[in-house]
C-alpha cells in the first residue's frame, strides 16, 4: 500500500495527528514503568523462602516472667508437642517476615565487625528441634547436636548468641566467602565471640528488609537453650491441621501462663500481612494501567471517528473511482499504525527517561530493555483495536456520497 | 453573554452525548486519581505540631566506637535522635531548652482488674515530665508527673482516653490503679484524644509513623526500673549488658528539645557540640558529628513519607496528563465538527474573542462536570485506601482544602485542555464555511 497519500492527509490534520501521537507516547511511557514496577513487586511477593511455609504456625508469647524462662520454655514445648498433629516444635527469637527482629554485624576476622561494610545479618536463635520445626533444608554440613543446644547461653548482651557454632544460608555463605567452602570457617560478632560454620541451608528470608533486596537472605542460625530471648514458638503440622493446632496451642499456653499474652498465626498469615502493602500496590498499578489504556483507546476512537466523519466525501470519491472497502479499511489501519509507531518511539525514549528519574529518586532498579518493545507492541495492538470501529464505518461509506453535496 | 454561552455549551453537549460523556469520564478519572493520591501525600507529609514545630528540635550525636567510620548523614538518617540513656539524661538535665523530654516506647502489658478478662498489649511511652506540655498533649482529667516523680521512680501513669474507655468505661479514673507489665501504677492523668500524625517522637525509637496514638505514658526512670524493655535497642558493643540498659552502650531513647525561639538553635547546637567535645576528651565519644534538625527537617531526614505514596502521586499525575491530552483531542474533534456553526456566528457579527470565550466556557463546564465526577472517584479511591493495610490508611479523608483543590485542578485542567480547540475555533474563517452550506 502506498503510504504517500496518508502523509499528505496527515499534514493537513497536523493537530489531531500530533494529539494521537502524544497520547500514545504518554501511555507507552507510563505503561512501561508501571508494568516494570508491577513485575518487581510480583517478584517480591513470590520470593522463595526455604522453610515449610505451608505447614508452620507461630505462637508469640509475651509478658511472661523472664526469670522463669528456664522452666517455662521446656514445659511449654512439651505441651505443644503433645497436641495431636504437631510433628515438631521449637522456641525461637523471631520469625521470618515477622514484626520484631534482632540483627547484628558479623565479620570473618576478629576486628572486621567494626568495618563499614561488615554485613548486617538476621540473628535467628532456636532451641532443640528448630531445623525440624522450621523445615530448614540442609545443603551441606550438619545441624546442631544436643550438646551444642545445651551449652548455648546468651551473654550479658542477650542479642549475642552463646555457643560456638552457626548455620548460615547459602546466600550469606557465598557473600562471606565468594570462592570457597564456608564449612569449618569462623565468623565473629564481637572480638571475643566467634562461631564455626557447621552447616549451610537453603535461603531463608529475614524478618525485615534491612539493607534492601541484595540482603533479603542474610540469615544466620544459632542454637540456644531455654532463655528469655525465646519469644515465639514455632509448631509444624499438616497444612489442614494448622487452625486447630493454633487454637489448642493458644488455649494450652494461656492456661500454663495466665499472665502471658499469646497470639497464634499461621506462617501464611504472617507472610500475607508482610506483603499486604506490596500486594495492594500491585493492584493499584494494574488498575491504573487498565484505566489508562481504556482512556487512550477511547481517545483514539473519538479522534478517528471525527476524522472519518470529516472525510466522508473524500472516502466516497475514492470508492467511486475504484477503491474497495478493504482499501479504505487498510488506509485507516495503516494511518493508525504510522501514528502509533511515532507515538511508541517517543514513548520508549520517555519511558527510559522516567526510569532514570525514578532510579535517582526512589529505590528502583534499571528497567530491563524488553519492557520497551513489549509496551510498544501493546500500544500498537491497542491502536489497531481502537481504530477498527471507525475504520469499518469508513469502509462502509457508499461511493454515492461523492456525487452528493458535502 | 455568559449565560448564553452556558446555554450553547449545554446544547452542544446534548448533541454529542457520547463524546461529552467520554471527556467528562476521562477527566473525572484523572482528577479522582490525583486527588486521592494527593490527599494521602498531604496526610503523610503533614505537620504534627503546626503551632510550634519550628521551635521543636531533635538533637543528634554519634556515639559509635572509634573504629566505626559511618558518614554522619547516613548514621543520622538511620538513627535520628536515638541515643544512649546516659547521654540523653545528661542533655536533659542540662536544661538548655525551654523544655526537653526523653522518649522510648515499650509494649505495655495491661492486665484488666475484671475477672475473666485476658491481659493485652498496648502502645506504651516511657518519657519524662515535660513531654505533655512540650507536645501540647491535652488532658481530660488530672495532669502529667513532675520531674521529681521521675527521679523518685514514682509509679504513676497517664493514660489515653481510649484506654480509659476500655478499662473504666470513660469515667474519671484519677487515683485508680492500672497494672502495667506486672507492676501497679497510679493513674494521675487521662488525655483527651491525641494522636499527632506522623507520630514523630516514635520514629527513631521503633514505633509506627502513623495511626492510632499511644495508650499509656509512664515515667522513663520508673518503667526502666521495672524492667520494661524499649522497642528499639541499638548496641555498639557485643559486651553491652542489656539487663542494665541505663548504663549500657546502647541507644534506645530519643531526645526532644523545645527552644524559646527558632533562632536559638545555633546556640543549642554549640552547646551540643561542646558536650560531644567534652565526651571525646573523656574518651566516651570518638566522633564530633552533631546535628539539630527542627521537627519538619527531622521528618524529611527520616523519610517518613513512604516511597510508594510518592510514586503513586507521580503516577496519578501522569495519568491526569494523559486524560488532559485525551480531552484536548476530543474537544478539538467536537469543535472542528462545528466549523459551520462557528462560521455562521462569525458572519452574524461575533468577534473572535466571543467565539474563543464561548469555547472556553464550554471546556470549563466539562471541567466542572469532571470535577464533580472526580470528587466521586476520589471518595471511592479514599474509601478503598481506608481498607488498605497501611498504618496511615484509616486517616485518609477528603478535607475542605482538597475539596477546593479538586475543582481548582479540574478547572485548570479543562481550561488548559480547552485552549487549543478554542483557538482553532476562533481562527475559523467564516466565508468558506458559509459557502459550502
Image: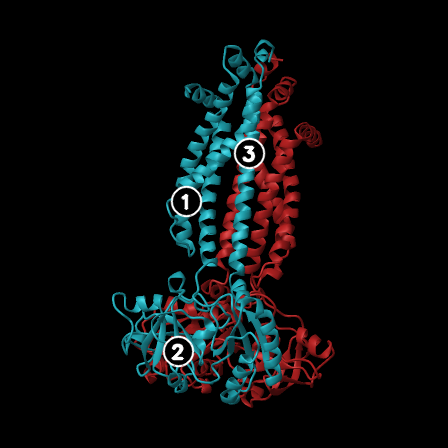
Question: Considering the numbered disc 3 on the image, is that residue within a helix, a strand or a loop?
Answer: helix
In the image, residue B71 sits, relative to residue B11, either above or below, namely below
Question: Considering the numbered disc 1 on the image, is that residue within a helix, a strand or a loop?
Answer: helix
What percent of the width, then of the height, locates residue B414? 59, 38
> Which chain does the numbered disc 1 sit on?
A
Residue for badge 1: A371
Residue for badge 2: A222
Chain B display color = red
Q: Which of the two marks, 2 or 1, is nearer to us in this view?
A: 2
Indicate the quadrant containing the N terminus of chain B: top left, top right, bottom left or bottom right.
top right
Q: Is A366 on the left or on the right of B379, as rendered?
A: left
Instruction: Please count the marks in the image.
Output: 3
What percent of the width, then of the height, locates residue A284? 55, 51
Residue for badge 3: A299
What percent of the width, then of the height, locates residue B258? 52, 73
Chain A display color = cyan
Q: Earlier in the sequence, mark 2 or mark 1?
A: 2
Question: Considering the numbered disc 2 on the image, is that residue within a helix, a strand or a loop?
Answer: strand
Residue at image location 55% in from the left, 22% down from the top: A308
What percent of the width, then of the height, locates residue A373? 40, 40
C-alpha gap between disc 2 and disc 1? 43 Å
Q: Earlier in the sequence, mark 1 or mark 3?
A: 3
Nearer-the-camera pick, A219 or B226: A219
Nearer-the-camera pick, B392 or A127: A127
**Circles 3, 2 touching at the beta carbon (< 8 Å):** no
Q: Quadrant of residue B185?
A: bottom right
> Which chain does the numbered disc 2 sit on?
A
- Whether marks 1 and 3 lie on the same chain: yes
C-alpha gap between disc 3 and disc 2? 61 Å
Seen as rendered, the residue at the extreme left is A179
Amino acid at each position: 500500500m502506498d503510504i504517500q497519500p496518508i502523509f499528505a492527509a496527515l499534514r493537513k490534520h497536523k493537530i489531531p495527528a500530533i494529539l494521537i501521537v502524544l497520547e500514545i507516547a504518554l501511555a507507552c511511557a507510563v505503561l512501561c514503568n508501571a508494568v516494570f514496577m508491577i513485575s518487581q513487586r510480583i517478584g517480591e511477593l513470590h520470593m522463595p523462602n526455604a522453610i515449610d511455609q505451608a505447614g508452620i504456625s507461630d505462637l508469640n508469647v509475651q509478658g511472661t516472667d523472664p526469670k522463669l524462662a528456664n522452666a517455662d520454655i521446656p514445659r511449654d514445648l512439651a505441651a505443644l508437642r503433645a497436641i495431636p498433629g504437631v510433628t515438631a516444635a521449637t522456641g525461637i527469637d523471631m520469625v521470618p517476615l515477622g514484626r520484631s527482629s534482632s540483627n547484628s554485624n558479623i565479620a570473618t576476622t576478629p576486628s572486621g565487625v567494626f568495618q563499614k561494610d561488615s554485613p548486617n545479618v538476621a540473628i535467628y536463635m532456636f532451641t532443640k528441634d528448630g531445623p525440624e520445626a522450621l523445615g530448614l533444608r540442609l545443603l551441606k554440613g550438619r545441624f546442631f547436636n544436643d550438646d551444642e543446644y545445651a551449652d548455648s547461653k546468651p551473654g550479658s548482651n542477650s542479642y549475642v548468641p552463646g555457643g560456638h557454632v552457626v548455620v548460615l544460608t547459602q546466600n550469606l555463605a557465598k557473600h562471606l566467602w565468594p570462592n570457597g567452602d564456608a564449612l569449618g570457617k569462623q565468623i565473629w560478632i564481637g572480638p571475643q565471640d566467634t562461631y564455626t560454620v557447621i552447616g549451610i541451608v537453603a535461603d531463608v528470608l529475614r524478618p525485615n528488609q534491612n539493607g534492601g533486596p541484595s540482603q533479603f537472605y542474610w540469615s544466620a542460625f544459632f542454637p540456644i537453650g531455654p532463655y528469655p530471648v525465646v519469644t515465639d514458638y514455632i509448631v509444624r503440622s499438616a497444612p489442614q491441621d494448622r487452625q486447630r493446632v493454633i487454637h489448642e496451642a493458644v488455649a494450652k499456653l494461656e492456661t500454663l501462663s495466665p499472665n502471658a499474652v499469646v497470639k497464634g498465626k499461621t506462617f501464611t498469615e504472617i507472610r500475607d500481612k508482610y506483603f499486604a502493602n506490596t500486594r495492594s500496590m500491585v493492584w493499584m498499578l494494574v488498575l491504573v494501567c487498565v484505566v489508562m489504556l481504556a482512556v487512550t483507546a477511547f481517545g483514539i476512537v473519538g479522534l478517528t471517528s471525527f476524522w472519518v466523519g470529516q472525510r466522508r466525501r473524500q472516502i466516497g470519491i475514492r470508492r467511486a473511482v475504484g477503491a474497495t472497502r478493504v482499501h479504505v479499511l487498510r488506509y485507516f489501519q495503516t494511518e493508525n499504525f504510522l501514528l502509533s509507531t511515532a507515538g511508541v518511539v517517543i514513548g520508549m525514549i520517555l519511558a527510559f527517561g522516567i526510569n532514570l528519574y525514578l532510579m535517582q529518586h526512589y529505590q528502583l532498579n534499571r528497567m530491563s530493555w524488553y519492557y520497551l518493545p513489549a509496551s510498544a507492541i501493546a500500544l500498537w495492538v491497542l491502536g489497531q483495536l481502537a481504530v477498527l470501529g471507525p475504520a469499518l464505518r469508513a469502509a462502509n461509506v457508499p461511493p454515492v456520497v461523492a456525487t452528493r453535496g458535502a | 453573554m455568559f449565560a448564553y454561552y452556558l446555554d450553547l455549551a449545554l446544547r452542544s453537549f446534548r448533541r454529542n452525548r457520547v463524546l461529552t460523556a467520554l471527556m467528562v469520564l476521562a477527566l473525572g478519572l484523572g482528577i479522582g486519581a490525583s486527588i486521592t493520591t494527593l490527599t494521602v501525600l498531604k496526610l503523610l507529609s503533614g505537620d504534627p505540631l503546626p503551632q510550634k514545630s519550628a521551635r521543636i528540635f531533635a538533637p543528634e550525636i554519634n556515639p559509635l566506637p572509634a573504629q566505626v567510620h559511618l558518614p554522619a548523614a547516613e548514621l543520622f538518617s538511620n538513627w535520628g535522635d536515638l541515643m544512649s540513656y546516659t547521654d540523653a539524661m545528661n542533655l536533659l538535665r542540662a536544661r538548655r531548652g525551654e523544655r526537653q523530654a526523653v522518649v522510648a516506647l515499650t509494649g505495655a502489658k495491661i492486665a484488666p482488674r475484671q475477672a475473666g478478662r485476658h491481659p493485652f498489649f498496648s502502645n506504651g511511652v516511657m518519657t519524662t515530665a515535660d513531654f505533655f506540655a512540650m507536645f501540647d498533649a491535652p488532658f481530660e482529667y488530672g495532669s502529667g508527673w513532675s520531674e521529681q516523680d521521675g527521679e523518685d521512680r514514682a509509679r504513676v501513669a497517664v493514660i489515653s482516653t481510649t484506654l480509659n474507655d476500655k478499662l473504666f468505661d470513660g469515667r474519671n479514673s484519677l487515683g485508680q490503679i492500672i497494672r502495667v507489665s506486672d507492676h501497679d501504677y497510679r493513674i494521675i492523668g487521662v488525655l483527651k484524644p491525641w494522636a499527632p500524625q506522623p507520630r514523630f517522637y516514635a520514629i527513631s525509637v521503633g514505633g509506627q509513623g502513623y495511626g492510632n496514638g499511644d495508650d499509656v505514658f509512664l515515667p522513663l526512670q520508673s518503667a526502666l526500673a521495672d524492667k520494661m524493655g524499649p522497642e528499639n535497642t541499638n548496641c555498639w558493643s557485643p559486651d553491652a549488658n542489656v539487663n542494665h540498659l541505663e548504663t549500657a552502650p546502647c541507644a534506645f531513647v530519643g531526645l526532644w528539645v523545645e527552644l524559646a525561639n527558632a533562632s536559638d538553635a545555633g546556640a543549642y547546637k554549640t552547646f551540643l557540640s561542646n558536650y560531644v567535645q567534652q565526651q571525646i576528651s573523656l574518651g566516651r565519644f570518638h566522633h564530633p558529628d552533631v546535628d539539630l534538625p527542627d521537627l519538619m527537617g527531622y521528618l524529611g531526614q527520616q523519610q517518613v513519607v513512604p516511597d510508594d505514596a510518592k510514586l503513586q502521586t507521580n503516577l496519578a499525575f501522569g495519568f491526569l496528563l494523559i486524560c488532559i491530552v485525551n480531552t484536548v483531542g476530543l474537544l478539538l474533534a467536537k469543535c472542528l465538527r462545528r466549523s459551520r456553526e462557528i462560521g455562521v456566528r462569525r458572519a452574524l457579527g461575533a468577534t473572535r474573542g466571543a467565539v474563543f470565550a464561548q469555547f472556553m466556557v464550554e471546556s470549563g463546564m466539562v471541567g466542572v462536570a469532571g470535577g464533580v465526577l472526580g470528587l466521586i472517584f476520589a471518595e471511592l479511591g479514599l474509601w478503598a485506601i481506608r481498607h488498605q493495610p497501611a498504618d496511615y490508611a484509616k486517616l485518609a479523608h477528603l478535607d475542605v482544602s482538597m475539596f477546593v483543590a479538586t475543582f481548582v485542578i479540574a478547572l485548570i485542567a479543562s481550561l488548559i485542555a480547552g485552549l487549543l480547540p478554542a483557538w482553532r475555533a476562533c481562527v475559523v474563517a467564516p466565508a468558506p464555511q458559509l459557502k459550502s452550506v
